Amino acid sequence: MWTLTSEVSLSVICLFEDAGFSNLLPLAYTRAVYELRCGIFTLGEKLFSLYPGHRISLHCRDYLIDAVAKRSNLPPLRASGEEPILFLNGRLIPRRGFSQLIPAEGEEAIYLCGKIVVGARLKGLRVDGFIIWLKKGGEGLPELGGNLPTHQIEAATIEYPWDLVTHNENLIRDDFAALGKGGIREGKVDSLARLFPEENIYLGPKSKIEPFCNLDASGGPIYIDKGATISSHTRVEGPAYIGEETIITGGKIREGCSIGPGCRVGGEVEATIFEGFANKYHSGFLGHSYIGEWVNLGALTTNSDLKNNYKSVRVQLGEDSIDTGVIKVGTFIAEHTKTGIGTLFNTGTVVGVGCNIFGGGLPPKYIPSFLWGGKGSFSEHKLAKFLETVKVVMKRRGGYLSPQEEEVLSKVFSLSKGEREDFLNSS
């Protein structure tokens, strides 16, 4: 029998993936949804920070869990059936004060945002029931039995890749305020650089602002993380986040950008999110886009983020063409993809994992994972050669391809095979 509703003394918080991860492919092929960046932090890091003092565990697709656990240094969910658990949906956009909407302690309950399960505070057999629901795909409402209360809350979730970009600017502001480091200068600033207003800027340890840089935080905060370098003749407009050890090289970083750790970015960038270790060293424009880890964009790679008729942009995700309802939508590029010089992406283009796009011109608006080519001529990017290149690229930055990550990439190659074959047969 199901236990009756009772008070819970919380000890564990578990981030989970529901069926909504599928709408975040291909970005979510290689990482759990809560590993996606929005603002200064990932979605998961933000949720953790709102519930201090509790043990954290993770749930995601089976093929990802070992890699996710290694990256995060957090354990997969292993419920004993005795510990109370607060489950939180990894697609949540956690604004300040969110933990008051789903308190860490209290009676067992389910929390909904519309029809989406965004939280569940459970113990005993209901924990087991929720885990069964997750293993079945996490779609609809879990059947947990008894008189379990449900509560509707006002919250937001990431539904599609462009939502990450849409919310990014406000989350940078939230994160900056929560960190409380405005006006602190722990890095080195050349006397010929201009930073204003300084109370809206944070410079982390060992960061460096070279001569003739302009950091304009009048429109929003700027957070320069540990060891980042802003090279001479660069302009950064807030709100913006520049990650650890990232180098901005003579670029124009316009408002609403989050650039993760170890990136190399030049040219003009607006309202764009970079995951870690991505390269856009050269000239070219990127706007309203999301760029995955280890992506390398060749010189003059440029995207459109606005249609000439100013109508909302449609984006192809798998077999579905979706009206975003947004007039500014750029390009979404999944991990380990590369572009050759002069590559031009149309408004609302999606590129999968492990692609190599070259030949200039406008490639298709939807390119499945592990494709090689351009100008209408594509072939499969062979897995063995792809992995060989990945290892070389990562070694150049002092990294390595872990067995867990290699297994993920091999699995994604298999998962995307049908879609890739359909694309090649129709082109």
Image (cartoon, rainbow, N blue to C red):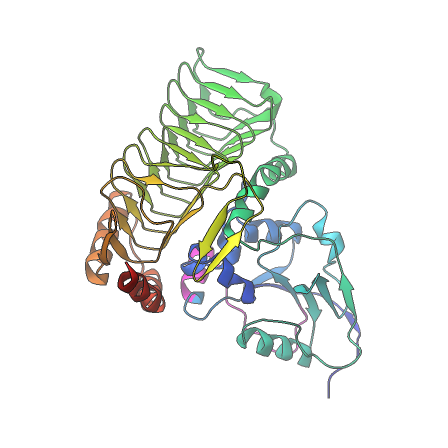
Q: Nearer the viewer, residue 35 or 254?
A: 254
Residue at image x 34%, y 49%?
364
Q: Which residues are magenta?
A: 66-85
Q: Quadrant of the C terminus?
A: bottom left
Point out residue 414 in the picture as x, y percentages from the top left corner: 32, 69
- Residue 343 position, x and y percent, is 29, 39
Which secondary structure class fits the magenta region best? Answer: loop
Q: Is residue 317 left or right of residue 358?
A: right
Q: Residue at x 41, y 60 (%)?
A: 29
Residue 17 visible somewhere in the drawing: no
Counting from the top left corner in percent of width and height, residue 194 is at 49, 14
Residue 144 drawn in magenta: no
Q: Is residue 67 magenta?
A: yes
**Residue 223 pos. (x, y %):** 53, 31
Residue drawn at x 24%, y 58% as measured from the top left: 387
Res 346 quadrant in image: top left
Q: Residue furthest top?
A: 192
Q: In the picture shown, does residue 149 fall above or below 309?
A: below
Please identify the quadrant where the N terminus is shown: bottom right
Nearer to us in this view, 285 or 83: 285
In which image quadrant can residue 54 be found?
bottom right
What residue is at 31 percent from the left and 49 percent from the top?
337
Lateral position of residue 345 relative to residue 159, left or right: left
Q: Is residue 352 above or below residue 79?
A: above
